[in-house]
Image (cartoon, grey):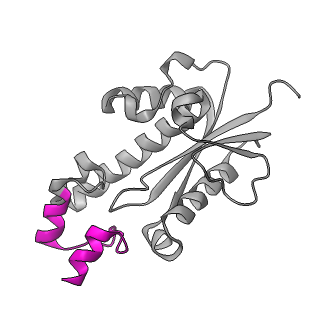
Amino acid sequence: MKKNLITAGVDEVGRGCLAGPVVSAAVILKKSINLKLLKDSKKISFNKREIVSNHIKSNSYYSIGLASVKEISDLNILQASLLSMKRAVDLLSIKPEIILIDGMYAPKNLSNAKTIVNGDEKIKVISAASIIAKVYRDNLMIKLSEKFSNYAWESNFGYGTKAHLNGLRKFGITSHHRKGFRPVHKILSN
């Protein structure tokens, strides 16, 4: 097998959220990357994640792919996640020879993709993708929380925390809520 294949890591963030898009990142690391900084995004503090994300961006080729709340509703969350991954890969300025994807499923039409369960913990290039996707999505939800301040998105990022659920009950849903997700759907049904 050929050594030093151009390898992209891909991960998504936001599958379990009640609001906002699902976001994927695709990353191809440059030799200048500090591999010691790369681990699963969930194991890095919010502030440090921002710093590490900037380091990755400066030392990689990367792209972001999104699937909207409407696409999540129309397709289902798994298919929307795969769509966001495909978009991220398609937007890379360099075409990877192999694509390592966190999880059990890969988008169709990516013949050079390999899935790795818990890849964000095991494979540095997937860790890098998880960090970039998480920082991007968190910042997007913080921005949305400025306009929609009743749901605590600046701290829960759209996940179904107590503060978010209380906001839903008290103020109803927004256009950014995933209407098919149980807690949101329940409030719509009342």
Left or right of 36 in this view: 90: right
Is 153 drawn above or below residue 97 in the view shown? below
Is 172 drawn above or below residue 111 in the view shown? below
Left or right of 135 in this view: 118: right
Left or right of 99 in this view: 11: left
Question: What's the magenta region?
Answer: 164-190
Q: Position of residue 170 (x, y in %)?
A: 10, 70
Q: Position of residue 180 (x, y in %)?
A: 37, 74
Which residue occupies the extreme bottom position in the image?
A: 189
Left or right of 5 in this view: 84: left
Which residue occupies the extreme left position in the image?
A: 170
- Quarter where residue 163 is shown: bottom left
Q: Position of residue 119 (x, y in %)?
A: 57, 36
- Image quarter where the C terminus lies is bottom left
Does residue 184 belong to the magenta stretch? yes
- Quarter where residue 188 is shown: bottom left
Q: Answer yes or no: is residue 34 visible.
A: no
Residue situated in front as seen by the camera: 146 or 74: 74
Is 175 drawn above or below residue 137 in the view shown? below
Tell me which residue sits at (68%, 19%) in the image. Answer: 31
Does residue 180 belong to the magenta stretch? yes
Tell me which residue sits at (76%, 59%) in the image. Answer: 109
Residue situated in front as seen by the camera: 128 or 105: 105
Q: Answer yes or no: is residue 60 visible.
A: yes
Tell me which residue sits at (51%, 24%) in the image. Answer: 38
